[in-house]
Amino acid sequence: MIIHRRKTGPVSKSDDRLTLMLLFYIAAVCGWLWEVLVYWGTSGFAGSLTELLVFYRGVLHGPWAPIYGTGGILLVLLYRAVQERKGYFFIAAMAVCMVVEYGTSWILEVFFHARWWDYSGQFLNLHGRICFVSIVGFSLIGLWAVQAVVPVCAGWIQKLTYETRKRLCLLVSLLFFLDVIVSVYKLSIS
């Protein structure tokens, strides 16, 4: 199990949900940071990284990319389900990554008439929404994350009191959903 037992007994369902929510936000922020660094690197490291961290935006205005949070949590749940059969995890992770990335691209294009990424011209791409390299890359990163990063982050989260986790989830969720509302509104009027 990825989320470890506390000294007082097994993790309750509400503890588990709070931990998963916080892991979602951690993955979303890490994904946003990854996007910033990739953008900075592909621009030849032009400009200040500090300015980029302040001004770089994806779909949302805040420092998070929910596609990474969604993919991350799905991979955590998948890893729990197939933990004994690690060989299956990578293949199933590729399927999860394909569905999340393709689905997100399609939804953004249908609802906002814009594309945030385009893999056209890349090896084995499908409508420019996904490609072989991105799927294998995200799956490898996902495998590493669920085995190495998630247990550490979940351990840190579990050290917080239940009330602290609850308040933190409430605060971050409020900020996140306000950002979603503002971002969707601005995208829909542009």
Image (cartoon, rainbow, N blue to C red):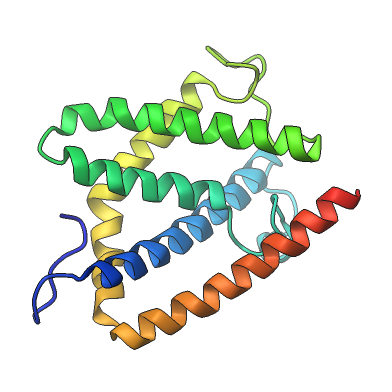
Residue nearer the viewer, 188 or 61: 188
Q: Nearer the viewer, residue 48 or 157?
A: 157
Residue 13 position in % (x across, y down): 25, 67
Position of 152 with respect to 185 (left or right) is left
Residue 176 at what x, y percent from top left?
60, 67
Residue 187, compared with residue 152, is above or below; it is: above
Q: Is residue 110 left or right of residue 131?
A: right
Q: Residue at (31%, 73%) from the top-left corner?
A: 157
Point out residue 165 in the picture as x, y percentages from the top left corner. 37, 80
Res. 182 image quadrant: bottom right
Q: Looking at the picture, does residue 36 appear above or below residue 96?
A: below
Q: Nearer the viewer, residue 165 or 90?
A: 165
Report the quarter where the N terminus lies. bottom left
Residue drawn at point x = 21 percent, y = 27 percent: 88
Q: Is residue 180 left or right of residue 142?
A: right
Residue found at x 11% / y 70%: 10
The answer to whether residue 92 is seen in the rendering is: yes
Up-down relation of residue 54 to residue 79 (above or below): below
> Does residue 115 show up?
no
Of residue 185 and residue 159, the one placed in the foreground of this image is 185
Residue at the spot 47% in from the left edge and 53% down from the top edge: 69
Residue furthest front in the image: 13
Q: Residue furthest right?
A: 190
